[in-house]
Image (cartoon, helix red, strand yellow):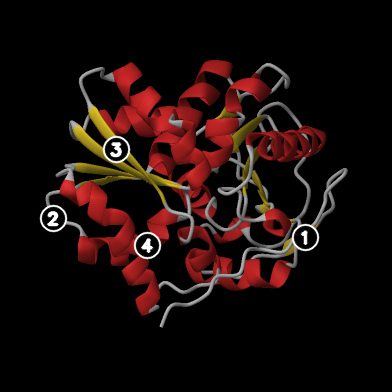
């Protein structure tokens, strides 16, 4: 545990190497990327933003996602971020290529690192993702670009993110939903499954109960952080001094985020609520529980 990170939310001293890495997601899913940053790049300072007021992203249009991503990136640049990681597969699928040409800061997405890792594991690859990511066909295109002979099947899973954000991982309904989503992929005899959303690693205990042991799981968070480390090396931007405490910000009510983050990170973060320009708050989707 890197306790020196968590003393508060002081702003980092801005210099090229000590500047923070920005990480954003619609909610707590991006914490899987944050944990990998702590593990692989322990000297980097981090700003984490969860757009909880507009969660979930996976049922949004490309136009909406692009608008949200631009707002967040403008804010990250204002905070002095030296690099931004889209810890959100939906944003990576629908906005990454567009915004890379609009901002003078390295922006990394999850899909290509995840695709490269998956083809090293198998040739019959399933992808579970938000409906927007699945409909974009981004993972299939990335996988086939890396290894043209690979077979790929994608499954949109609209209920997973709300269930995870509601901390319903032990709910029998969550198990039944997972079985419904995985059944078509298992019928295809997949040998590899990609977590096509950063929320989904939290479902690992549920998925392990359903998947054969032979199916390998790929978490793109591990591989995007490895790519970030390589990029920082190439740019000469790695920080070699102790990092500043991680700064956590959300666009909605901080309390639900704090409860989940405390459980999954092992400490209670200090969380700021911030308003981005032209931010329109909308309520999260409420799910009906099937008895």
Q: Look at mark 3 in the image and give the residue it sits on.
A: 153
Residue 272: mark in rendering: 1
Asked if marks 3 and 4 touch (Cβ < 8 Å), the reply is no
Position of residue 79 measured from the top left corner of the image (x, y, whole percent): 79, 39
Q: Residues within 10 Å of mark 3 (few under 14, many from 20)?
A: some
Q: Look at mark 2 in the image and give the residue it sits on.
A: 213
Up the image or down, 153 lies above or below 266; here it is above
Q: Look at mark 4 in the image and give the residue it sits on.
A: 203
Which badge, 1 or 3, is on the more N-terminal residue? Answer: 3
In 3D space, how far apart are the residues under numbered discs 1 and 4 (Cα atoms)?
27 Å
Is residue 170 something that shows in the picture? no
Q: Residues within 10 Å of mark 4 (few under 14, many from 20)?
A: some
Q: Which element is circle 4 on? A: helix
Which badge, 3 or 4, is on the more N-terminal residue? Answer: 3
**Residue 72 placement: quadrant:** top right
Which badge, 1 or 4, is on the more N-terminal residue? Answer: 4
Q: Residues within 10 Å of mark 2 (few under 14, many from 20)?
A: few
What residue sits 58% from the left and 17% below the top?
A: 235
């Amino acid at each position: 545990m890197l306790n020196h990170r968590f003393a508060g939310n002081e702003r980092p001293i801005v210099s090229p190497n000590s500047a923070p890495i920005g990480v954003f997601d619609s909610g707590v899913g991006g914490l899987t990327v944050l944990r990998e940053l702590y593990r692989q790049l322990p000297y980097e300072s981090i700003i984490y933003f969860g757009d909880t007021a507009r969660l979930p992203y996976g049922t949004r249009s490309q136009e909406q996602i692009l608008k949200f991503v631009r707002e967040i990136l403008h804010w990250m640049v204002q905070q002095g971020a030296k690099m931004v990681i889209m810890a959100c597969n939906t944003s990576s699928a629908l906005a990454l290529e567009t915004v890379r040409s609009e901002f003078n800061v390295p922006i990394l997405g999850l899909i290509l690192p995840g695709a490269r890792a998956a083809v090293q594991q198998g040739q019959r690859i399933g992808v579970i993702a938000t409906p927007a990511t699945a409909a974009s066909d981004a993972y299939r295109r990335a996988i086939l670009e890396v290894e043209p002979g690979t077979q790929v099947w994608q499954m949109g899973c609209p209920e997973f993110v709300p269930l995870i954000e509601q901390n319903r991982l032990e709910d029998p309904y969550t198990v039944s939903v997972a079985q419904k989503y995985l059944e078509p992929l298992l019928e295809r005899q997949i040998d590899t499954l990609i977590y096509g959303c950063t929320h989904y690693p939290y479902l690992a205990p549920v998925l392990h109960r359903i998947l054969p042991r032979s199916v390998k799981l790929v978490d793109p968070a591990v591989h995007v952080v490895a790519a970030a480390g390589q990029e920082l090396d190439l740019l000469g931007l790695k920080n070699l001094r102790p990092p500043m405490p991680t700064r956590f910000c959300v666009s909605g009510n901080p309390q639900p985020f704090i409860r989940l983050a405390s459980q999954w990170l092992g400490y209670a973060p200090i969380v700021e609520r911030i308003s981005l320009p032209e931010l329109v708050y909308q309520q999260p989707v409420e799910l009906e529980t099937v008895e």
